[in-house]
Amino acid sequence: LRAIELFPSANTPSGWGSTPNPQAYAELINAVQFALNDQGFNHTVIAVGLDASSGSQSALQFLQELYAANSSFFYPIISLHLPYIAHAPGTNPKDASSHTLRFYEDARQIMLDNGQQNGLLWITRFDWSTTEFNQSQDQVTWLQQAFLTMRSQLYIGMASYYCLNATTSSTNLIASNGAPSVVFDALGELIAAENSGISITQIIPIEGSGNNHDSKPVSP
């Protein structure tokens, strides 16, 4: 265990357990990190698990107020939760009425505005809306494009797909009978290509992957 996501979705009442309070959260994360360091534990505390489904603007406001509450504290990792995304992965946040995968661009801008250029974003939850993407091939295409979109950003340290084998979801990688889904197979192909040094664009075409501040080529 090397990292701890402290109160994920802290910007929501369900995540915080009360009315979200960025000042209180800043005090808590500072105290936890200090206590871990004081006891000799080399764990990284991941901040917020910022949940964009609560509304992009309110989520971003929480992040800004978190920085304002303790401007001298460096948060090495800010995490994001991006559930039930109803748009194609390359969709510009400015062109959508609800949160998009590229919400991370707006979160990154706030990090930069607060002098956190060396911080990372971890996407500790992402999944698509089954209302918009309810066919297997649509889901495969969505995952492939999401991989390209996130892979091209230097500041994204990791991304974790949410639904492995939940019993009530059609977005699972593993079906209720234990069989892998076609999405599981597509993900395996992406990982295999990455590990073998094959350019991802040889497998799938790249579409609008964003034009943010620190980008990298999609080939490994």
Image (cartoon, rainbow, N blue to C red):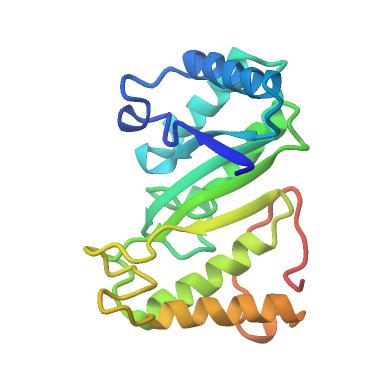
Residue 208 visible to the viewer:
no
State the residue at coordinates (36%, 32%).
15
Q: Is residue 107 above or below residue 82?
A: above
Nearer to us in this view, 6 or 79: 6
Measured from the top left, where is residue 74 in percent x and y? 71, 25
State the residue at coordinates (61%, 18%).
30
Residue farthest along the bottom direction in this orientation:
202
Q: Is residue 218 above or below residue 79?
A: below
Measured from the top left, where is residue 157 in percent x and y? 67, 51
Quadrant of the image occupied by residue 181: bottom left
Q: Quadrant of the N terminus?
A: top right
Q: Quadrant of the C terminus?
A: bottom right
Residue farthest along the left direction in this orientation:
168
Measured from the top left, where is residue 36 in percent x and y? 64, 24
State the residue at coordinates (31%, 20%).
18
Quadrant of the image occupied by residue 29: top right
Residue 193 visible to the viewer:
yes
State the residue at coordinates (52%, 47%).
103
Q: Is residue 134 above or below residue 43?
A: below
Nearer to us in this view, 202 or 79: 79
Nearer to us in this view, 155 or 106: 155
Q: How many marks?
A: 0
Q: Is residue 47 left or right of residue 155?
A: left
Measured from the top left, where is residue 43 in percent x and y? 66, 35
Quadrant of the image occupied by residue 210: bottom right
